Amino acid sequence: MAFIVTDNCIRCKYTDCVEVCPVDCFYEGPNFLAINPDECIDCALCEPECPAGAIFSEDELPDGQDIFVELNQELALIWPNITEKKDALPDATEWDGVEDKLEHLER
Ligand code: SF4
Ligand code: F3S
Protein backbone atom coordinates (compact mmCIF):
# COMPACT_ATOMS: atom_id res chain seq x y z
CA MET A 1 0.00 0.00 0.00
CA ALA A 2 1.28 3.44 -0.88
CA PHE A 3 0.15 7.01 -0.93
CA ILE A 4 -1.06 8.38 -4.26
CA VAL A 5 -1.00 11.87 -5.76
CA THR A 6 -4.37 12.54 -7.41
CA ASP A 7 -6.14 14.89 -9.81
CA ASN A 8 -6.04 18.12 -7.83
CA CYS A 9 -2.24 18.29 -7.95
CA ILE A 10 -2.42 18.87 -11.72
CA ARG A 11 -1.63 22.49 -12.64
CA CYS A 12 -1.07 23.36 -8.96
CA LYS A 13 2.08 21.43 -7.91
CA TYR A 14 2.54 23.17 -4.58
CA THR A 15 5.43 20.79 -3.65
CA ASP A 16 4.98 21.13 0.13
CA CYS A 17 4.72 17.34 0.12
CA VAL A 18 8.32 16.70 -0.86
CA GLU A 19 9.73 18.45 2.19
CA VAL A 20 8.38 15.92 4.66
CA CYS A 21 8.95 12.65 2.81
CA PRO A 22 11.55 10.64 4.75
CA VAL A 23 12.43 8.47 1.76
CA ASP A 24 12.38 11.14 -1.00
CA CYS A 25 10.02 9.21 -3.22
CA PHE A 26 8.42 12.12 -5.12
CA TYR A 27 9.09 12.59 -8.83
CA GLU A 28 8.44 15.78 -10.77
CA GLY A 29 6.74 16.33 -14.09
CA PRO A 30 5.83 19.63 -15.74
CA ASN A 31 2.59 20.12 -13.79
CA PHE A 32 2.17 17.12 -11.44
CA LEU A 33 4.16 15.08 -8.96
CA ALA A 34 4.11 11.31 -8.68
CA ILE A 35 4.95 9.06 -5.75
CA ASN A 36 6.92 5.90 -6.46
CA PRO A 37 4.76 3.27 -4.74
CA ASP A 38 7.68 0.87 -4.40
CA GLU A 39 9.62 3.43 -2.38
CA CYS A 40 6.77 4.93 -0.31
CA ILE A 41 6.85 3.60 3.27
CA ASP A 42 3.25 4.59 3.97
CA CYS A 43 4.19 7.05 6.71
CA ALA A 44 1.30 9.43 5.89
CA LEU A 45 3.38 12.55 6.61
CA CYS A 46 2.77 14.07 3.17
CA GLU A 47 -1.02 13.80 3.15
CA PRO A 48 -1.79 16.74 5.49
CA GLU A 49 0.96 18.89 3.96
CA CYS A 50 -0.69 19.21 0.53
CA PRO A 51 -2.60 22.52 0.34
CA ALA A 52 -4.66 21.05 -2.49
CA GLY A 53 -5.65 17.91 -0.57
CA ALA A 54 -4.40 15.85 -3.49
CA ILE A 55 -2.66 13.02 -1.58
CA PHE A 56 -4.51 9.95 -0.35
CA SER A 57 -3.70 6.50 0.89
CA GLU A 58 -4.30 3.98 -1.88
CA ASP A 59 -7.02 2.33 0.20
CA GLU A 60 -8.83 5.63 0.80
CA LEU A 61 -8.90 7.02 -2.72
CA PRO A 62 -11.95 9.16 -3.55
CA ASP A 63 -14.27 7.91 -6.27
CA GLY A 64 -12.89 8.32 -9.76
CA GLN A 65 -9.26 8.54 -8.69
CA ASP A 66 -8.25 4.91 -9.28
CA ILE A 67 -6.46 5.80 -12.52
CA PHE A 68 -3.88 7.68 -10.47
CA VAL A 69 -2.57 4.45 -8.92
CA GLU A 70 -1.20 3.41 -12.30
CA LEU A 71 -0.18 6.94 -13.23
CA ASN A 72 1.92 7.44 -10.10
CA GLN A 73 3.70 4.16 -10.71
CA GLU A 74 4.31 4.87 -14.38
CA LEU A 75 5.37 8.49 -14.11
CA ALA A 76 7.61 8.05 -11.06
CA LEU A 77 9.82 5.82 -13.18
CA ILE A 78 10.11 8.41 -15.95
CA TRP A 79 10.43 11.70 -14.10
CA PRO A 80 13.35 13.08 -12.02
CA ASN A 81 13.36 12.97 -8.24
CA ILE A 82 12.37 16.13 -6.33
CA THR A 83 13.37 16.63 -2.70
CA GLU A 84 13.06 20.37 -2.09
CA LYS A 85 10.04 22.61 -2.18
CA LYS A 86 9.84 25.12 -5.02
CA ASP A 87 7.32 27.76 -6.02
CA ALA A 88 3.89 26.44 -6.97
CA LEU A 89 2.82 26.85 -10.58
CA PRO A 90 1.91 30.51 -11.27
CA ASP A 91 -1.82 29.92 -11.63
CA ALA A 92 -2.07 27.25 -8.91
CA THR A 93 -4.77 29.06 -6.96
CA GLU A 94 -7.02 29.32 -10.02
CA TRP A 95 -6.69 25.59 -10.74
CA ASP A 96 -6.97 24.40 -7.14
CA GLY A 97 -10.33 22.66 -6.83
CA VAL A 98 -11.13 22.47 -10.54
CA GLU A 99 -12.43 18.96 -11.17
CA ASP A 100 -11.19 16.42 -13.70
CA LYS A 101 -7.88 17.98 -14.67
CA LEU A 102 -6.42 14.77 -16.10
CA GLU A 103 -6.68 16.13 -19.63
CA HIS A 104 -4.23 18.85 -18.59
CA LEU A 105 -1.57 16.44 -17.32
CA GLU A 106 1.71 17.10 -19.11
CA ARG A 107 4.30 14.39 -19.42
FE1 SF4 B 1 6.74 9.84 1.38
FE2 SF4 B 1 5.45 9.01 3.57
FE3 SF4 B 1 4.13 10.35 1.67
FE4 SF4 B 1 4.96 7.87 1.21
S1 SF4 B 1 3.42 8.49 2.71
S2 SF4 B 1 5.14 9.60 -0.19
S3 SF4 B 1 6.89 7.82 2.35
S4 SF4 B 1 5.79 11.15 2.96
FE1 F3S C 1 0.93 18.29 -5.68
FE2 F3S C 1 0.05 18.75 -3.26
FE3 F3S C 1 2.51 17.96 -3.57
S1 F3S C 1 -0.43 19.94 -5.09
S2 F3S C 1 3.05 18.83 -5.52
S3 F3S C 1 0.70 16.79 -4.08
S4 F3S C 1 1.81 19.49 -2.13
Image (cartoon, rainbow, N blue to C red):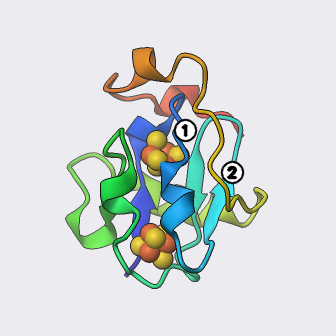
Could you say where residue 38 lies in the image, as x and y percent from the top left? 57, 82
Which quadrant of the view contains residue 48?
bottom left
Can you identify the residue that label 2 sits on? 28
In the drawing, does residue 93 fall left or right of residue 33? left
Disc 1 under 8 Å from ligand 2? The reply is yes
In the drawing, does residue 41 fall left or right of residue 98? right
Could you say where residue 2 lies in the image, as x and y percent from the top left? 41, 76
What residue is rendered at 41% in x and 63% in y?
Answer: 46
In the drawing, does residue 78 fall left or right of residue 101? right
Q: Is residue 41 above or below residue 88?
A: below
Could you say where residue 3 lies in the image, as x and y percent from the top left? 40, 69
Residue 83: mark in rendering: none
Can you identify the residue that label 1 sits on? 13
Q: Residues within 10 Å of mark 1 (few under 14, many from 20)?
A: many
What residue is rendered at 52% in x and 27% in y?
Answer: 103
Q: CA distance from mark 1 to mark 2?
A: 9 Å
What residue is rendered at 56% in x and 59% in y?
Answer: 18
Could you say where residue 66 lies in the image, as x and y percent from the top left? 35, 56
| Sequence-first tag of 1 and 2 | 1
Q: Nearer the viewer, residue 16 or 74?
A: 16
* Amino acid, disc 1: Lys
Q: Nearer the viewer, residue 17 or 98?
A: 17
In the drawing, does residue 45 fall left or right of residue 13? left
Which quarter of the image is occupied by the C terminus?
top right
Q: Residues within 10 Å of mark 2 (few under 14, many from 20)?
A: many
Which quarter of the image is occupied by the N terminus?
bottom left
* Amino acid, disc 2: Glu
**Dot 1 and dot 2 residues touching (CB under 8 Å):** yes
